[in-house]
Amino acid sequence: MLLDIIDQYDIQTKELLYNLRDQILDHVGQSVDSKKIVSFLGKVGVIGLDETEKTVHIGVPNEFVLTQVKKFFSKPLQEAIHAVYNNQFSLSLVVYA
């Protein structure tokens, strides 16, 4: 479960990950229909940042959502990461359940 992954972090890291998720989704929402965001991105979350590999890890609940997010949201999510976090970081999608 997503909360189990996030709960392992200290308070500051949790806040960073939650805030980053909100900023990313707000940015994606500027160019993507809100119904699609609710349907496919409602249960995703930023589960980690890898400073060494310059990667933002976004967790999805299952393989179906992973497929849909890759198909419809990879580019908007990558653009959002560049816009709201760091333009040197790339997107990594992983199933967290």
Image (cartoon, helix red, strand yellow):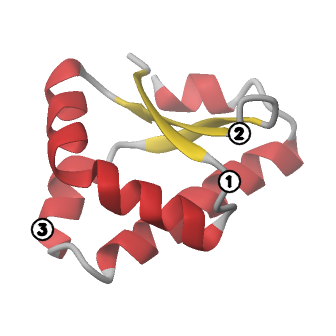
Secondary structure of the residue carrying numbered label 2: loop
Give the labeled residue for mark 3.
Answer: 35
Residue type at mark 2?
Lys
Give the labeled residue for mark 2.
Answer: 54
Residue at mark 1 to residue at mark 2: CA–CA distance: 7 Å
Looking at the figure, which quarter contains the C terminus?
top left
Q: Would you identify the image quadrant in which residue 18 lies?
A: bottom right
Q: Are marks 1 and 2 in contact (CB under 8 Å)?
A: yes
Going 25% across and 22% down the picture, which residue do you hit?
62
Residue type at mark 1?
Gln
27 left or right, relative to 81: left
Residue type at mark 3?
Lys
- Mark 1 or mark 2: name the one nearer the start of the chain: 2
- Vertical position of residue 70 compared to residue 85: above or below: above
- Mark 2 or mark 3: name the one nearer the start of the chain: 3
Secondary structure of the residue carrying numbered label 3: helix
Going 13% across and 26% down the picture, which residue do you hit?
64
Residue 42 in view here:
no
Give the labeled residue for mark 1.
Answer: 88
Q: Are marks 2 and 3 in contact (CB under 8 Å)?
A: no
Q: Position of residue 76 (x, y in %)?
A: 33, 62
Q: Would you identify the image quadrant in which residue 69 lies?
A: top left
Secondary structure of the residue carrying numbered label 1: loop
Residue at mark 2 to residue at mark 3: CA–CA distance: 30 Å
In the image shown, does 18 or 29 lie closer to the viewer? Answer: 29
22 left or right, relative to 77: right
Q: Position of residue 39 (x, y in %)?
A: 15, 53
Going 21% across and 73% down the picture, which residue do you hit?
32
- Vertical position of residue 58 compared to residue 22: above or below: above
Q: Which is in the foreground here, disc 2 or disc 3?
A: 2
